Amino acid sequence: MGQWTTKPKGEVSMEGHKKTAVITGGATGIGRAIGMKLAERGANIVLNYAHSEQEARAAAMLMEERGAEVLLIQADVSKEEDVKRMIEWTVEQFGGIHYLVNNASITKQLELSDLEAVTDECWDQIMAVNVKGMFSCARAAAPFLKREEGSAILNMGSIAGLTGSGSSLPYAVSKAAVHGLTKSLAHALAPAIRVNALAPAAVATRWWQGEEEKMLRLSGHLPLQRLSTPEDIAELACAILVQESLTGQIISPNNGMLI
């Protein structure tokens, strides 16, 4: 099952009220940036990671420096047992859940045209984390999210799910499925829980280390002449979480890539 570590329950607030945000895949990249922004806004943070323990502990320390109480949980979102235990620990420590950020995702760098490189194992791993994992987290958290006014789920999609092109074919397909899942959950959980997705274009994270040329090639012409940073995406994520008139939407911060 892995190690489970915790800090004592604390009293923190977000916009005048205590909020608890569960962030899967929160140790690095976009998940880490979202955790930092929410910490600055006074939220309790439940920081989930699968393998990046050292990075997760470092991220937790930075969030604590910004005033957050942090519950650090190792869990594999593709395993329903892990997901259920993660949610149980969250509610035990903080009393409830206001926001779920389904950020945990995996990919493999494969040329889109190389169909022979796409193995059954590749399909199974990517779909288990990127799609089934997000559903499992939403299902486990939903009863507790329904108890809180203004609760929301934010799924991390991708521009690959809109264009069909990305780091690999299974990844692009998985993100298209995430977009569909978002809309279905928005129907299923309304009016109690809002559900939206972000579909960023290329973001400068460790996923693209050593693959910068491919990233720029896939990005094509960008009218804003820039790549997004994790902090860009985090700012937008925080805004979406509190937007009470928004649900079932796939919002793509892509620097003009699709216009």
Image (cartoon, grey):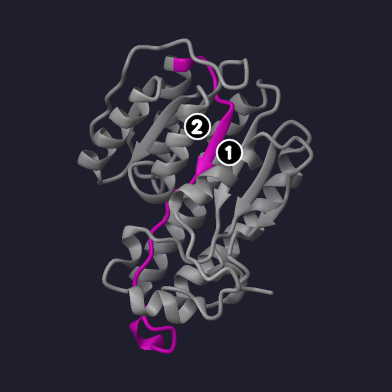
Helix, strand or loop at disc 2?
helix
What residue is rendered at 37% in x and 73% in y? 120
Q: Position of residue 247 (x, y in %)?
A: 74, 45
What residue is rendered at 25% in x and 33% in y? 57
| Quarter of image, res 107 | bottom left
The image shows residue 148, relative to residue 38, as above or below, that is above
Going by the numbered disc 2, the residue's amino acid type is Leu
The image shows residue 6, relative to residue 162, as above or below, that is above
**From the viewer's perspective, is 15 left or right of 62?**
right
Q: Position of residue 254 (x, y in %)?
A: 58, 65
Going by the numbered disc 1, the residue's amino acid type is Cys
- Residue 102 belongs to magenta span: yes
Q: Residues within 10 Å of mark 1 (few under 14, many from 20)?
A: some
Q: Which residue is mark 2?
A: 38
What residue is rendered at 66% in x and 47% in y? 196
Tag 2–tag 1 contact (CB < 8 Å): yes
